[in-house]
Amino acid sequence: MTLRDSHVFAAAAGVVALHTITNAFVVLEPGVQPVDHAVSGLVPLALLAAAVVRYALAPAGLQAVLALALGVLAVEGLALAVANARAGGVRGDDWTGFALGPAGLALIVLGVALLWQSRKPHGRRLLRRSLLGAVAVLGIYWILLPVGIGLMATHRPQETVEAVDLGRAARSVTLRTADGLDLRGRYVSSRNGAAVIVFPGSASRAAQARVLVRHGYGVLMLDPRGYAESEGPAALRHAPASTRSD
């Protein structure tokens, strides 16, 4: 390990930390306070700090693992920022998300270089590389993949409400959650005394909603928190709500 390697890792981790701070505490979703992101913001920052400290003391193999893992997650963050910008224009933390690209690439190059430098030309190379490959596959499956899926689930690009033809006129409604957020939806009044909530109220559920409307049911197409025009972060658990019409 060289001092330059540590500086590269620390600088790239700093870019990831900057994006985390911006996403969690600076650029907030409508109806959300910084305290709502205390855990989701502070835990990654603590892990990044621990990774920087551990990197300086770790052997080359572990350094490579840390660099590659953080690099892959940074590239995923770049992809999410690009997708969000394409969906609704560049805004908020997309700018720090774009910076994750060079940081992630630097980390991946650093990780590959460390693996190459730390290789042992002698001994049981086939057995050693087979074991390392198996450990890498398990690490990706048990750790990196779940974290990546979690990032995709809680940082989906902003969505716009698509026009959905339900066969009858629908009026806009707002549901106020117990924690004070407004969830948006569209409601078709009931003709048989019963109503059904279609959740999430996306265009992909329009066919089922039309069947219900055709049979006289009232239908509420409800947008989840953090998506479309609904307030709040998508990661929070849904809270009880009371309905009011716009």
Image (spheres, rainbow, N blue to C red):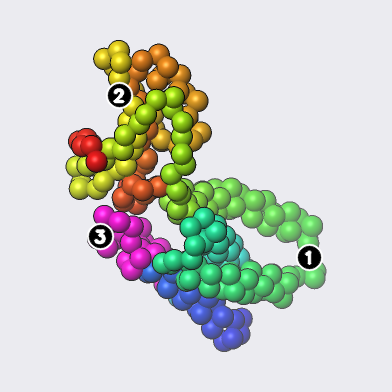
Disc 1 to disc 2, C-alpha distance: 75 Å
Number of marks in the rendered image = 3
Residue at left offset 51%, top offset 80%: 11
Q: Nearer the viewer, residue 43 or 235?
A: 235
Answer above or below: position of 184 versus 13: above
Q: Dot 2, how many residues are within 10 Å of its Cα: few (below 14), some (14-19), or many (20+)?
A: some
Which of the marked residues, 3 or 1, is nearer the chain's N terminus? 3
Q: Residues within 10 Å of mark 3 (few under 14, many from 20)?
A: some
Residue at x-position 73% and y-position 72%: 116
Residue 208 in view here: yes
The reply to whether callout 3 and callout 1 are in contact (CB within 8 Å) is no
Identify the residue under disc 3.
33
Give the CA separation, mark 2 to mark 3.
35 Å
Left or right? Give the position of 105 relative to 216.
Answer: right
Closer to viewer: mark 2 or mark 3: 2
Residue type, label 3: Gln
In this figure, which residue is indicated by the disc labeled 1? 123
> Which residue type carries mark 1?
Gly
Kindly state the secondary structure of the residue where label 2 is placed. Answer: loop
Q: Secondary structure at mark 3?
A: loop
Q: Which residue is mark 2?
A: 189
User: Which mark is in front, 1 or 2?
Assistant: 2
Quarter that holds the N terminus: bottom right
Q: CA distance from mark 3 to mark 1?
A: 57 Å
Q: Which residues are magenta?
A: 23-51
Locate residue 205 relative to residue 183 in the image: left or right: right
| Residue 191 figure quarter | top left
Above or below — where is 18 with respect to 194?
below
Q: Which of pointers 3 and 1 indicates the residue nearer the eye?
A: 3
Contact, CB < 8 Å: mark 1 with mark 2? no
Q: Nearer the viewer, residue 134 or 221?
A: 221
Query: Residue drawn 39% across and 25% down?
Result: 168
